Amino acid sequence: MFEVSEANRTAKCIEIKAYDYMLRFEKSFNGFQSTGTAYDFINLCCLACSVEMAQTQDEIEAMANGSETLSIYSEEDIETYRDVLYYVGQVLGGFFVINRKGKLELRKYGSESVLDIAQKHRFSSSFSDFITRYTAVSSTNMRTETAEYYSVDPDDGLTMNLGVNPLLQFGLDETRAQLCTNILNDLQAVNYVPFDSDTIGNPALDLGDVLTFSGGQADEDQITCITSIKYTIGGRQTLKCVGKNPKLSQAKSKNDKNISGLLSQIEEGKMGLYTYTNASAYTVADSNTKIISMEFTAKEETYAEFIAQVVVEISADSMRMEMWYMSAN
């Protein structure tokens, strides 16, 4: 499903340029601070940008890190709602796409092949002599000014650099470690051979589909993943899987995990004002409900003032009351 952005008329035809609904998320994010689960942030983006979600709340919360409470306390480099989805996708160990029904869908890295492409179905193909795989993740902690490093044994593959993910900046050290470890566990499915191939075409294939190739120079025992698709109407289909060589990571010192993180420069003596908005509405009834949760830290002695405003919508159950009057004789 696509939206037409340009329609240029010529003497014989109409030239159309269209994009899928992912472009709708290139909408300015107002930078408010918030707390919620991954589903809350996804739903927030979809409501703001008028895109329907493909997965339910239960499906998102069933994923690793899906039920964890995440926080944004600084706008950092978040400029658009698409940036928010990028960081949420990192936390959930996957990536977002617009599916064929025009809905926003989170896809996880797979390890089971959906199709084998034989040599007779390929016009041309090239395969790398290495397998892209990840054995570590690195996440910059702004509070400690270090890049925290989590790995499996043996650590001889690539490192996924999560950068300064705002959703991973606050909370207990144990919570951060568990979040990053869950991301690393999801990355273990990435064991792909990069390739480039022109095939006869299969319109059922989509981004993230895992394939096997057989015949010719292909190794049918290895899997690969589609990261790029190019269709030519009435012609060939070009498939690609991009990836880096894990051997190149050995040239980098593991001391990189101790490098200073990239921090926002705060000028001394300047006042900063930050606003907070909850990602989803709270239902308050008979039991106590926590509606505001906030952590504050400073590198030097300073003064902070917290002002809260709670906007409520009150609804009450209807009650019928009967009144009787008695007259005295």
Image (tube, rainbow, N blue to C red):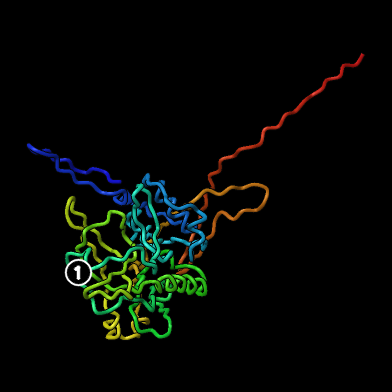
Q: Residue furthest left?
A: 11
Q: Quadrant of the C terminus?
A: top right
Q: Quadrant of residue 160?
A: bottom left
Q: Residue furthest front?
A: 120
Picture residue at 43% right of the left edge, 81% below the top: 152
Q: Quadrant of residue 76?
A: bottom left
Picture residue at 39% right of the left edge, 69% below the top: 111
| Residue, disc 1 | 125
Graded by Cα atoms within 10 Å as few (under 14), some (14 to 19) or many (20 or more), the crowding at tag 1 reads: some
Give how far across and how far down residue 135 sits, in percent.
38, 79
Q: Nearer the viewer, residue 98 or 283?
A: 98
Q: Residue furthest top?
A: 329
What is the total number of numbered labels drawn onto the structure image? 1
The answer to whether 329 is drawn above or below residue 3 in the figure is above
Give how far across and how far down residue 323 sits, in percent.
79, 24
User: Element under label 1?
Assistant: strand
Give how far across and how far down residue 320 sits, in percent.
72, 29
The answer to whether 203 is drawn above or below residue 264 in the figure is above
Kind of residue indicated by mark 1:
Ser
Q: Nearer the viewer, residue 54 or 175?
A: 54
Q: Nearer the viewer, residue 42 or 140?
A: 42
Q: Is residue 232 left or right of residue 309?
A: left
Picture residue at 39% right of the left edge, 67% below the top: 112
Give how far across and how far down residue 263 sits, in percent.
35, 70
The answer to whether 116 is drawn above or below residue 284 in the figure is below
Q: Is residue 197 left or right of residue 180?
A: left
